[in-house]
Amino acid sequence: MTHTDSDPDFIEFKFGTFENATAAEKAFPLTFVSLGSSIALRAGVVDDMGDGIRERLRGLGLEWTEAPSSLTEEDMWPSEPSDSDDEDDDLDEDLKEAPSAFSP
């Protein structure tokens, strides 16, 4: 399946409770995002592995709904700040002044 800009980055599996979502984690590959009572997974992973995930969830006796998530790649991995960002300079200065735990 080819994704376009209008396709969601993540699909959200909603379980209703935190406990059910925690129990469902074992049905997912390691690359999921826990959102409390739901789990978000990259849309491409759902395309590739969705049938197996759903089968494992049914085997665990869980009920869920699936919907496009509002979570985006940008939410997960924001782009690097520009070099002109003054806050980075302040952080660099703070680090220079901080005592080092590895100093002799």
Image (spheres, grey):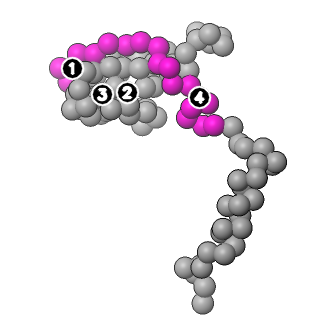
Instruction: Give the residue drawn at x 76%, y 48%.
Output: 85
> Which type of secondary structure does the marked residue at label 3 adopt?
loop
Quadrant of residue 14 in the image?
top left
- Where residue 80 appears, as percent x and y from the top left, is 71, 42
**If you read the primary sequence from the N terminus, does the residue marked by circle 1 or circle 3 appear first?**
3
Question: Nearer the viewer's eye, disc 1 or disc 3?
Answer: 3
- Where residue 99 appears, as percent x and y from the top left, is 60, 79
Q: Do the residues labelled 2 and 4 touch (CB within 8 Å)?
A: no
Residue located beneath label 2 in the image: 39
Stretch in magenta: 60-78
As measured in the structure, the alpha-carbon distance from the residue carrying label 2 to the one carrying label 4 is 15 Å
Q: What residue type is labelled 3?
A: Ser
Residue located beneath label 4 in the image: 73
50 versus 97 height, above or below: above
As measured in the structure, the alpha-carbon distance from the residue carrying label 1 to the one carrying label 3 is 13 Å
Residue located beneath label 1 in the image: 62
> Which type of secondary structure does the marked residue at label 2 adopt?
strand
Crowdedness of circle 1 by 10 Å Cα count: few (<14), some, many (20+)?
Answer: some
Is residue 68 highlighted in magenta?
A: yes
Instruction: Give the residue drawn at x 60%, y 37%.
Output: 77
